Amino acid sequence: MDITPHLEKLERTVDVMHVAQSEELQKQAWDYEPVERLPLIVSFFDKVSKIRTAVPDWPLFPYAEVFHDPAKMLLDELSELYVGALVGDNKMYTIRANYGVGILPSLFGCRIELHGERDMPWIESLSWEEVKQAISRGVPDISGGLMERVVETEAYFREVLGPYPKLSQVVRMTVCDTQGPFNLAAEILGNRIYTDLYDHPDVVHELLDLVTETYIQAGRAQKEFLNEPLDSGYNWHFRMRGGTRIAEDYALSISPKQYEEFVVPYNERAYQAFGGGYILYCGEGRQILDGLLSTPGTTGIYLWSENAEDLLMVYPKAASRGICVLCCGPPWQFLSDEICTGLIWERVASSLEEARRWTAS
């Protein structure tokens, strides 16, 4: 597949100075400094429903094709950057080798399968005996499993983008999806993790210790390959304060006491290795919010919610700790006058015209 015409089009469209100004605006918002306007990221991809609005004049592919073809993966990753170039929003131009949440679980022997053309990869959890064997073996070879393909794809991205001066300057290749300690343990154990917290807490702690160290080593290796500092970086169109991101999904269903025991110490250890970072918080989980925000090293919280009440509940708690809120959800009119910095706003547009109205307002 010849992707050159699309790369040339993006090269012509990108405004390098605007991207630099957007980075400074994001930095000010992360640091709770006064901002001229809250940074706005416009997306044509709903990360929750996985529904993508067609990007004008840019090819889209079923994920199964993206998974098997690095050229199509690159175009898929660049599609949101093309949206940003067309509408002039404040996103960082980030791309990654997008092989789903199973990259690190694959290092432990979890099978990764595709079940549909448009579905992300499915992880087959390990048996109880396989989990104990994995713990006894210790940290796996972090160059194995899907990570081998990740590095090959990153090298391909670098080679293909190299001849384009503006793209080489503004496109940031980011660490692949390394998830977070509790998510990784849950993906390896499967849903039984919720009963294992009661029945086999010692084994869960052993597994959490192992996956946390694996998370750290894999993140360090990725950053070295991508020439990114340990304590700073980019992720999902954000310029981070700190150097890592933790995804928190499975822990939204546990108690505050369990969160303090089984999540906080491992997240804190992960943050320490990278000078802090942000946490992705998607769905209902108010019972753990205070523990999540009080974890040392948390610099940002990425909230996915269409409920304005969630933002109005999270923001004051986060602001009191200097934690930036990254919000993908309700329209602008739900903002209160008190929210004048410390927030990066993301919205999913239904059309190019709608997106341009938002960036012009």
Image (cartoon, helix red, strand yellow):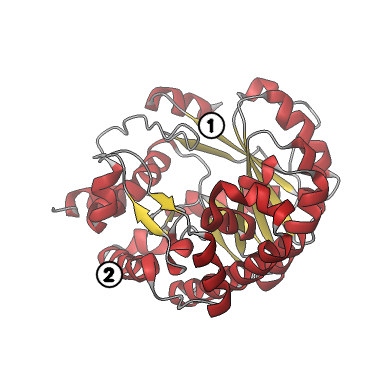
**Residue highlighted by disc 2:** 159
Q: Residue 360, position in %: x, y?
A: 52, 28
Relative horizontal placement of residue 169, taking residue 247 as reference (left or right): left
Q: Position of residue 220 (x, y in %)?
A: 55, 75
Kindly indicate the quadrant of the structure image that contains residue 216: bottom right
Specify the label residue 277 is tagged with. Answer: none
Above or below for 331 versus 37 = above
Name the residue at the right extreme.
Answer: 320
Could you tell me residue 2's position as x and y percent?
13, 53
Q: Residue at x 76, y 63 (%)?
A: 265
Residue 360, compared with residue 1, is above or below; it is above
Q: Mark 2 belongs to which amino acid?
A: Glu
The residue depicted at 65 percent of the width and 38 percent of the height is: 38
Q: Position of residue 101 (x, y in %)?
A: 47, 53
Mark 2 residue element: helix
Amino acid carrying mark 1 in the image: Arg
For the residue carrying disc 2, how many other residues have a C-alpha within 10 Å: few (<14), some (14-19), or many (20+)? few
Is 232 above or below relative to 15? Answer: below
Q: Quadrant of the C terminus?
A: top right
Q: Nearer the viewer, residue 348 or 293?
A: 293
Q: Name the residue under label 1.
A: 347
| Residue 35 falls left or right of residue 214 | right
